[in-house]
Image (cartoon, grey):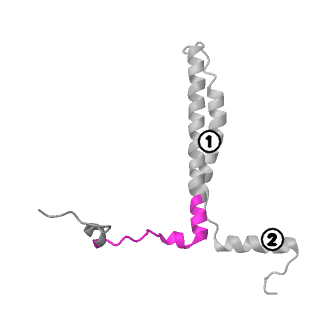
Amino acid sequence: MSQPPQGPHDPVEDSFPLQPYRPSMELDPEMRKRALERIEARQAWRQHFTVYALVMTLLTVIWLVTGGIGTYFWPVWPMMGWGVGVAIHGASLVLDKEPTEKEIADEAAKLRKRLGRPDHPED
């Protein structure tokens, strides 16, 4: 009968040295920050949509309880109004793109001109 391993070392663990997972993005703090911002923006939209869906469900239930079927479906107005806001919020996530180097350079040139600074920082 064999004995179980004694002490702090497990032979299975020793055969697979554990290295912490470090994606390349972790090495670039700016990319990590941008990625976190995008994740937070998607989470904010999901929260926005969830609240919208819950409130619209509540309004529809109120409509049903107060006469409902066969009467004017008034919840359509807040659905459309707030729905436009939710759609624009979602579209901003889809259409949001990283600026190109040319766009960054053009914007920096506009700022330097507006502030009265030279065209090149070395000047």
Question: With 76 as the anchor, is 4 left or right in this view?
Answer: left
Q: Residues within 10 Å of mark 2 (few under 14, many from 20)?
A: few
Vertical relation: 26 (above or below) 51: below
Residue highlighted by disc 1: 86
Q: Secondary structure at mark 2?
A: helix
Q: What residue appears at the point 34 percent right and 73 percent down from the top-left corner?
A: 17
Q: CA distance from mark 2 to mark 1?
A: 33 Å
What amino acid does circle 1 point to? Answer: Val
Vertical relation: 14 (above or below) 44: below
Quadrant of the image for the C terminus?
A: bottom right
Q: Residue furthest right?
A: 116
Label whose residue precedes the other's in the sequence (2 or 1): 1
User: What numbered label is drawn on residue 111?
Assistant: 2
Q: What residue appears at the point 52 percent right and 69 percent down from the top-left corner?
A: 25
Question: With 120 as the anchor, is 27 left or right in this view?
Answer: left
Q: Secondary structure at mark 1?
A: helix
Q: Nearer the viewer, residue 43 or 79?
A: 43
Image coordinates for residue 31, horizontal then vertical, percent: 58, 68
What amino acid does circle 2 point to? Answer: Leu
Range drawn in magenta: 15-36
Image coordinates for residue 92, horizontal then vertical, percent: 62, 52
Quadrant of the image for the N terminus?
A: bottom left
Image coordinates for residue 60, horizontal then vertical, percent: 57, 23
Q: Nearer the viewer, residue 9 or 72?
A: 9
Q: What residue appears at the point 47 percent right and 70 percent down from the top-left corner?
A: 22
**Is 60 included in the stretch rendered in magenta?**
no
